Amino acid sequence: MIQEVGPEHVFDNRFEPHECGLDDYVLHYAQGGCLARVTHVGGADADAGDSGEEVELPTLADLPRPPARLTYAFSLGERRFFLALDDSVSAPRGFAYAPVSWLRRAEPQHLLFAVATGSQLDRWYRANRFCGRCGARTELAPRSREIVCPECAAVVYPKICPGVICAVTWCDGDDERIVLTRYAGRTTALWALVAGFTEIGEPLEDTVRREVMEEVGLAVKNLRFYKSQPWSFTDTLLVGFWCEVDGDPAITLDRTELKEARWFSRAEIPLERTGDRTSLTGEMIERFRLMGRAAWA
C-alpha cells in the first residue's frame, strides 16, 4: 500500500523545530498540485492510474529563491521534508505543479507517499490560517504540530477523518462471493468495496453496518478487522473490515452514492486491481480473489 515504503525509508512524523538544509526536500502545493518534475504523467483517470510516472521533488538548493515560510513536515529514512506555506514559490527549471491524484502509481513510491502526506498537511495549515473561534490570524506552535490562536488560545490539531472499507462476503462451500461496487458521478470505471466515513459518536463497527445497509441494503455479521491505511488524498484514516452477509443476499442499491453493485465469485473478479500497490481497497479485493475465506482465517 502507499505507506509501505520499505525499511530504508521509515516514516518519522515526530515534529522537531529543524532548520531546512540545502539537501532537504521542499514540498509546495498550488494550482491543485505539487511542485515536481514528472515524466510519463498519467491520465485524468486517477483511480485507474497509468503506470510509468516518475517523480522528482525539489530540494532547497534547487529553488531559485528560498521560501519565506518553511515548516518541518516529516522524514523518510535519512531524508527530511519541509512544507513551504508561501502562496507561491519560484519553480526550478523543469518543475511544474502536477495533480496529486495523477501520481498514485508514481515512482519512487516513497516520494509518492511524501507528496500525498504533505498535501494533507498543506490543506490543514491553509484551512486554519484564521481562528475559527475569534477570527484572529493563527500561528504555528514552535515545538509541536499544532496551530494556535494568540488572541483566544484556541488550539487546532491536524485533521484526520476515520473511515471504513468493507469487504462484504458470502461463502457456501466452494461458492465464495464478494460485493463490488462502482461509484456514481466518477470517471473511473474501477470496481471498489463499500466504504464510508465514521459519524460522531459512532464506533467503527457500527460504521460498517450502517454503510453497508445504506449503500447496498445488506445486513452483515462476523466483522473482522483486517488492517488500516492513511489515505491522505481525502484526509482519511481507512480501517478495513471483512464481514459476512446476514440473511437475504439481495442487493438494494443506493443510486445517490453508487451506479452499480453486485456479487462476484472469485473467478469473476476483474483483474484490474492485480497491480494495485497503493490502496487498501485493491489489496483486499485481490486477497479475496486469490484466497477466498482464507483471506481472514
Image (cartoon, rainbow, N blue to C red):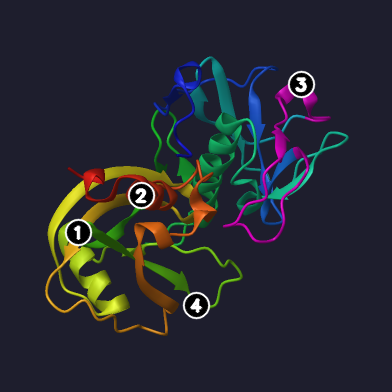
Q: Farthest residue toward the right? A: 93
Determine which residue is flagged by label 3: 61
Q: In which quarter of the image is the N terminus?
A: top left
Label 1, label 3: how far apart the Cα atoms are: 51 Å
What type of secondary structure mainly makes up the magenta span? Answer: loop
Of the residues shown, which amino acid type is indicated by label 4?
Ala
- List x then y, in percent, for residue 16: 44, 23
Residue positioned 42% across, 84% down in the render: 256
Secondary element type, mark 2: helix
3 or 4: tag closer to the N-terminus? 3
Label 1 Cα crowd, 10 Å radius (few <14 / some 14-19 / many 20+):
many
Of the residues shown, which amino acid type is indicated by label 3?
Ala
Determine which residue is flagged by label 2: 284
- The numbered dot on residue 243 is 1
In the displayed structure, would residue 221 be above or below residue 229?
A: below
In the image, the segment drawn in magenta is 37-65
Residue 147: within the magenta? no
**Camera-nearest residue between 46 and 72:** 46
Label 2, label 3: how far apart the Cα atoms are: 41 Å
Label 2 Cα crowd, 10 Å radius (few <14 / some 14-19 / many 20+):
many
Determine which residue is flagged by label 4: 184
Q: Quadrant of the C terminus?
A: top left
2 or 1: tag closer to the N-terminus? 1
